[in-house]
Every structure is written in structure tokens, then in C-alpha cells.
Image (tube, helix red, strand yellow):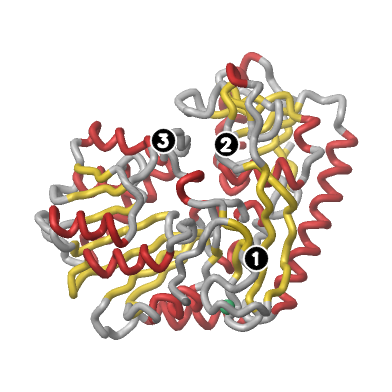
């Protein structure tokens, strides 16, 4: 049955239309989970490696992972990512709250639900703006941080069952947001049915996720990790949500995290904003419907791999560090596996929960960035390369005058 709820393990069919006519776009081999950090004190524990292969459905043009690890393994109490500690992420979520209130004439008492609310950062922005009827839904251990903002939270996975409990306790929501969650869940059908359970007829469901066009355009193969089961285009999202009775209302793209799309759906038949057709045209003109676009993408990555290998080989006697460890950096480190032999450590901001951990499947340690001013590196490889300008300028100003800053993607870039 095409219920869009996938079991764990290999998928030999399209996640959306169930066709078996798939084109292999990229094979990343077997990799540990990008968030499976090992505490330095538990160095004997080994990571489990899972396959990642990215397929394009030739029938409906959906880009997708061929292996499902499962929500229970990926999103557990030890989850490390927290938006609240990164200023750029907080600023983006603040903008989302502001725009939502303004565009939808949101009243302070209207219920706002954020699914995959993590540490409550997005909801705290609504609260700051005078809204008090807020609910987070978060399965991982980061849910405890909602307490800091005095915001209600359900510590559970969002699905049909939990949506029924939410409905009976809190009623229906005017706004439901989900940022960087909708591409992740393996019970997609249950998730969307759950949204239908708790959304008002005049409600708006806002999805924000990494975006297929930017992934392909900027060679972002590092967005292909086990958590990202699907990479959406606007066209594919509209097609999926239509199956469940949702209409597209608004769509926006932005440069956030290397390229993002925000899409607004509603159960009411509405006139779509002019942005929607504009973005759809850009997708078609770029060639997202053409399988050759994806094969070219693959050959670009192989070229970058060779350039990087030669760069590191030339600089092997230098003191080289990595900067920042977003989950996607694990994919770069494993697919360009020679990188880890050259890095002394990876620096993260001092408040990060990732410090004193090893990068999954390696003996490469994540340490506080306070060390960078004491041990000035010759080369800093910026693994959060979408923030290359911000990070390189900041550290140049902080005193790394002679350090060369290197971005591995979208192509090898060196700032001396
Ligand atoms: Zn398909």
C-alpha cells in the first residue's frame, strides 16, 4: 500500500510513487551516522556503518536515499544539534516568527505548534513577540530546553498517534511549523496525516528544508546523510502534499545553510502566490527534470575530490585544523576520506555539546575553538563551508593573520 510509511532497511522503489525505475546519482558507500559522536572517554565504542546511495526516480523525478535507518535510532536522547547556540540560526528563526505573525495576522492566543522543535528556539521567538499559546513536539533529549523559555513541549515523535493526544489536549493550530524535519522522517504518511489532525481549516503548515536546486547547483553532496531521506524540489513537495489534500499557498527560497526552501500549505483552496510559479519555472529551466543534470553533478564532485587531494598532499607538513562540525561535515570527511589524515582536530565554539567527542568513525577530536588563538593553524578547513565568509573574516579579525582558509565546497576555494 502506498502509505508513505517506510520500514527500516533498503528501499528498491521510489518513496513517493513506488516505481522501481531508479537512476543511481551517487553512491557514498557505507558511512557512520553523521551525529554518532563518540565521547573521548568512551573511545572503545564503535560506530555502526550504514549504506547511503542517492537515487533519482525516473518516473516522478524524486531524489532520495535508498536506505532507511529509522527515526528511533537517529533521534534519541543523545541528539547533539541545538539551533539555540548559533546566532545565524537564531536570527533566521526570529525572521520566520516575525514574518509568520505579520503575514497571517496571527493573534497572541492562536495556537502555534513547532514539530521537531529541538531546544524551543523558534517558539521562543514567537513568545518574545507576545504570543503565548505555543507547543513544541520533540523526541530527542533537547526537549528539556523548552523549560528555559517556559514553553509547553510534548517529548515524543510526531505521528498519527501523538497528533491525536495533542489535539485532545491543545486543540487545533493556526500555524504549524517544521524546520529541517520533513525530509527526515521515515513515517512520512503518518506525519502528514497527523498534521491534518491538528491544523485548523484556515491554518497554515510551513515546511522549511534544504532545497534540491541548491544542492545540485552548489555540489552539496554533503547534504546526503542518513537523516536526509529525501531532497525536495518545490514541484515534488506540491505533488506529495496534493495527495493528502493540501494546497500550495506560498514558497520562498533563501541562502540559509547553503540553500533552503520554505513552503506554505493549507487545506483551503487558495490562489497561490506568484512566487510559486516563478520558482517552478526556475526549476524546470535549470533542468531538475533532466537525469543528465544529476550525472553532471556527480562528475563535478569527483573533480573536486581530486583537486582537494592534490591540495592536501602539497601541504601535508602544515598544521591544519577543521572548523565546525555540522552533521554534514561527517559526509565530507568520509567521502573525501584523505581529509581526516591531515586534520589535527576540529574546532567548535566553546558552548557546543560536541566538544570532547570524536568525529563518527574516526579518532579525530572536536575541541574548543579557544585553542585556535594559542595554536595558530597554517590552514583552517571550513567544514561549515556555507558560512565561509563569516567564519574566515571572524577568525582573521580575531588574530589568525597568517592562516589560509579553505572551503571544500561548492568547489575548492583558498583565502590567504
Ligand atoms: Zn517516483
Residue placed at 45% from the left, 80% from the top? 239
In front of the other: label 1 or label 3?
3
Query: In the figure, 262 relative to 379: above or below?
Result: below
Compare marks 1 and 3 and give the one earlier in the sequence.
3
From this viewpoint, which residue is outermost toward the top? Answer: 374
Q: Return the residue nearer the eye: 287 or 99.
A: 287
Callout 3 crowding tier (Cα within 10 Å): few <14, some 14–19, many ≥20: few
| Whole-percent x, y for residue 313 in the image | 89, 36
Whether residue 286 is visible to the viewer of this picture, yes or no, is: no
Q: In this figure, which residue is indicated by the disc labeled 3?
A: 77
Determine the secondary structure under disc 1. Answer: helix
Q: In this figure, which residue is indicated by the disc labeled 2?
A: 36
Quadrant hosting residue 387? top right
Numbered mark located on residue 216 in the image: 1
The answer as to whether callout 2 falls within 8 Å of ligand 1 is no
Query: In the figure, 92 relative to 23: above or below?
Result: above
| Whole-percent x, y for residue 396 in the image | 62, 30
| Whole-percent x, y for residue 193 in the image | 32, 69
As drawn, is 379 to the left or to the right of 147? right
| Whole-percent x, y for residue 143 in the image | 32, 38
Q: CA distance from mark 2 to mark 3?
A: 12 Å
As drawn, is 351 to the left or to the right of 118? right
Quadrant hosting residue 149? top left
Callout 1 crowding tier (Cα within 10 Å): few <14, some 14–19, many ≥20: some
The answer as to whether callout 3 falls within 8 Å of ligand 1 is no
As drawn, is 44 to the left or to the right of 114? right
Amino acid at each position: 500500500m502506498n502509505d508513505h510509511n517506510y520500514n527500516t532497511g533498503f528501499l528498491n522503489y521510489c518513496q513517493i510513487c513506488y516505481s522501481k525505475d531508479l537512476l543511481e546519482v551517487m553512491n557514498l558507500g557505507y558511512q557512520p551516522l553523521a551525529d554518532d559522536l563518540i565521547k573521548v572517554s568512551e573511545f572503545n565504542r564503535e560506530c555502526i556503518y550504514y549504506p547511503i546511495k542517492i537515487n533519482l526516480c525516473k518516473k516522478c523525478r524524486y531524489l532520495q536515499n535508498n536506505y532507511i535507518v529509522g527515526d528511533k535510532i537517529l533521534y534519541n536522547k543523545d541528539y547533539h544539534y541545538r539551533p539555540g547556540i548559533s546566532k545565524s540560526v537564531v536570527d533566521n528563526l526570529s525572521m520566520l516568527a516575525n514574518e509568520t505573525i505579520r503575514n497571517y495576522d496571527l493573534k497572541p492566543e492562536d495556537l502555534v505548534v513547532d514539530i521537531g522543535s529541538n531546544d524551543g528556539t523558534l517558539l521562543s521567538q514567537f513568545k518574545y513577540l507576545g504570543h503565548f499559546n505555543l507547543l513544541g513536539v520533540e523526541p530527542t533529549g533537547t526537549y528539556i530546553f523548552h523549560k528555559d523559555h517556559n514553553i509547553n513541549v510534548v517529548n515524543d515523535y510526531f505521528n498519527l498517534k501523538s497528533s491525536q493526544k495533542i489535539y485532545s489536549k491543545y486543540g487545533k493550530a493556526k500555524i504549524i511549523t517544521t524546520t529541517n524535519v520533513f525530509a527526515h522522517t521515515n513515517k512520512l504518511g503518518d506525519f502528514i496525516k497527523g498534521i491534518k489532525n491538528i491544523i485548523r481549516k484556515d491554518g497554515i503548515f510551513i515546511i522549511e528544508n534544504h532545497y534540491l536546486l541548491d544542492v545540485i547547483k552548489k555540489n552539496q553532496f554533503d547534504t546526503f546523510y542518513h537523516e536526509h531521506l529525501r531532497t525536495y524540489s518545490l514541484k515534488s513537495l506540491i505533488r506529495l502534499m496534493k495527495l493528502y489534500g493540501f494546497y500550495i499557498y506560498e514558497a520562498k527560497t533563501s541562502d540559509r545553510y547553503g540553500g533552503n526552501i520554505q513552503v506554505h500549505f493549507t487545506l483551503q483552496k487558495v490562489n497561490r502566490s506568484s512566487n510559486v510559479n516563478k520558482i517552478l519555472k526556475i526549476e524546470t529551466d535549470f533542468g531538475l527534470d533532466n537525469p543528465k543534470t544529476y550525472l553532471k553533478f556527480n562528475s563535478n564532485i569527483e573533480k573536486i575530490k581530486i583537486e582537494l587531494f592534490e591540495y592536501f598532499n602539497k601541504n601535508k607538513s602544515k598544521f591544519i585544523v577543521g572548523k565546525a562540525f555540522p552533521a554534514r561535515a561527517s559526509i565530507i570527511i568520509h567521502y573525501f576520506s584523505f581529509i581526516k589524515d591531515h586534520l589535527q582536530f576540529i574546532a567548535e565554539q566553546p558552548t557546543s555539546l560536541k566538544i570532547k567527542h570524536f568525529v563518527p568513525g574516526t579518532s579525530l577530536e572536536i575541541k574548543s575553538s579557544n585553542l585556535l588563538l594559542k595554536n595558530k593553524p597554517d590552514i583552517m578547513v571550513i567544514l561549515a563551508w556555507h558560512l565561509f565568509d563569516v567564519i574566515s573574516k571572524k577568525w582573521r579579525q580575531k588574530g589568525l593573520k597568517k592562516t589560509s582558509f579553505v572551503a571544500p565546497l561548492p568547489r575548492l576555494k583558498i583565502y590567504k
